[in-house]
Image (cartoon, rainbow, N blue to C red):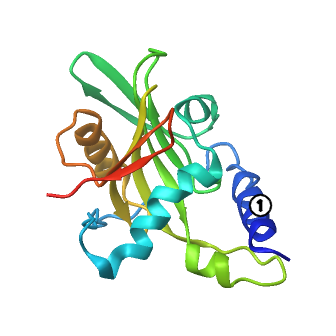
């Protein structure tokens, strides 16, 4: 099986993952802290590439995040006057958590399962590559932005606070991808 066929099998398995049964929302873990890999740190190059490539390979867009249903509601938070609701569960495939608002023009925040690119390239026999963890992303009609990385699923309280900070632009992003050109720019400094 080629690397491309293995990629398709991995993405299909992640997107097709069954959602939770009604009322069964998996909790995140307390004490999980977001990592912020630096674009200049060559020791983290594989992680940075995986974070930047996963949304492109999975074709995740603001619209797919908005359209993704979930039985699990995980509380809400506000950015100014805009109210966001946190949704999702561990069985929701590539996008296990997402925050959206009723306003269709508003940005969204989401966690994206980050594909292990090394395992993907090295895989044989169509085995799924697995994931490294979760990238905290925001998406607007113009760009997708990577803000942080979690090795395990954080608690809902941590995620709501981190998503609120990212949506408000309170941190320096790790990278930005122009949705029209698909060009990714890593932020240094």
Q: Is 176 situated above or below 132? A: above
Q: Is 124 situated above or below 112? A: below
Question: Whole-percent x and y of residue 133?
Answer: 47, 67
Give the quadrant of the C terminus: bottom left
Q: Is 131 situated above or below 86? A: below
The residue under the point 46% across, 57% down is: 52
- Whether residue 151 appears in this view of the structure is no
Near mark 1 (Cα within 10 A), the count class, few <14, some 14-19 or many ≥20, is: some
Quickly name the residue at label 1: 8
The residue under the point 25% across, 44% down is: 161
- Left or right of 155? Residue 120 is right
- Left or right of 22? Residue 86 is left
Give the quadrant of the N terminus: bottom right
Q: Nearer the viewer, residue 44 or 32?
A: 44
Question: Whole-percent x and y of residue 46?
Answer: 44, 75
The residue under the point 65% across, 55% down is: 91
Residue 4 picture quarter? bottom right
């Amino acid at each position: 099986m080629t690397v491309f066929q293995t990629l398709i099998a991995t993405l299909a398995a992640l997107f097709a993952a069954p959602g939770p049964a009604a009322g069964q929302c998996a909790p995140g873990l307390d004490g999980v802290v977001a990592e912020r890999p630096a674009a200049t740190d060559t020791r983290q190059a594989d992680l940075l590439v995986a974070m930047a490539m996963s949304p492109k390979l999975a074709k995740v867009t603001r619209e797919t995040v908005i359209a993704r249903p979930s039985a699990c509601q995980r509380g809400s938070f506000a950015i100014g006057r805009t109210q966001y609701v946190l949704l999702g569960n561990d069985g929701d495939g590539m996008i296990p958590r997402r925050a959206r608002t009723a306003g269709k023009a508003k940005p969204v925040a989401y966690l994206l399962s980050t594909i292990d690119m090394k395992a993907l390239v090295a895989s044989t026999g169509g085995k799924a590559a697995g994931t490294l963890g979760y990238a905290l992303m925001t998406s607007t009609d113009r760009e997708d932005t990577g803000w942080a990385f979690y090795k395990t699923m954080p608690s809902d309280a941590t995620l709501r606070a981190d998503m609120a900070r990212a949506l408000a632009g309170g941190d320096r992003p790790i990278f930005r991808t122009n949705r029209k050109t698909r060009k990714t720019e890593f932020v240094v400094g």
